[in-house]
Amino acid sequence: MKLLMIYCDTFSYKPQIKTLPDFPDFTEDAIFDNVLVAFIQMEEKDIAISPKIETKLLKNLKWGAKKNNVKHIILHSFAHLSTSKADPQSTKQLFDKVETRLKNANYKSDQTPFGYFLDINVQAPGRSAARIFLDF
């Protein structure tokens, strides 16, 4: 799994091109303030160890949120961090499970539209904890 976390003063998106027809349609854009955005790539090897990957992802997201003093985490599928990709259904299942667990742990969590290229706007401060990359 590859995980790039970016603390954003403001993060917004607008759906542009649907790339995965088996997933729901989205047309609405969204804007969020004071959030940790997690750019996540689930790799093919992660499917076999999914429960462990889920727990490790959750722990790292909570750690990144704590480092940046936020309680709102945005999950974004970003299949450009590695050449290895898990199938979309496995990735979406992982996102749904992690989002539920975050909410159960008193975090606010949202997902960007799955299966879309998005116009995104990232306004992130220039400090070290605002950008964290992990490979696990």
Image (cartoon, helix red, strand yellow):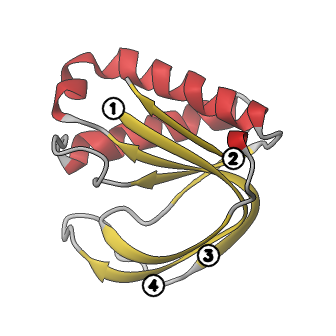
- Disc 4: which residue: 27
Rendering quarter of residue 85? top left
Q: Earlier in the sequence, mark 4 or mark 1?
A: 1
Which residue is located at x 37 percent, y 37 percent?
A: 2
Rendered residue at 41%/76% (across/down): 118
Between the residue at mark 3 and the residue at mark 1, the CA separation in whole angstroms equals 26 Å
- Amino acid type indicated by mark 4: Thr
Q: Position of residue 76 (x, y in %)?
A: 46, 55
Which label's residue is closer to the chain start, 3 or 1?
1
Helix, strand or loop status at disc 2: helix
Q: Quadrant of residue 3?
A: top left
Give me the residue at 71% from left, 37% from top: 65
Disc nearer the start of the sequence (4/2): 4
**Three-letter amino acid code of the residue under disc 1:** Met
| Of labels 1 and 2, the one closer to you | 2
Which mark is in front, 4 or 2? 2
Of mark 1 and mark 2, the one earlier in the sequence is: 1
Could you classify mark 1 by the number of other residues whose Cα lies within 10 Å: few (under 14), some (14-19), or many (20 or more)?
Answer: many
Kindly report which numbered mark, 4 or 1, lies closer to the viewer in this rendering: 1
The answer to whether 42 is drawn above or below residue 32 in the figure is above
Q: Please name the residue that numbered disc 1 is placed on.
A: 1
Does 96 sit left or right of 64 as displayed? left
Q: Which residue is mark 2?
A: 130
Q: Residue furthest right?
A: 69
Residue at 29 percent of width and 82 percent of height: 17
- Which of label 3 and label 1 is nearer to you? 1
- The image position of residue 54, as x and y in percent, is 42, 25
CA gap between label 4 and label 1 equals: 29 Å
Look at label 3 and name its amino acid: Ala
| Residue labelled with disc 3 | 30
Q: Amino acid at mark 2?
A: Ala
Circle 3 — which element? strand
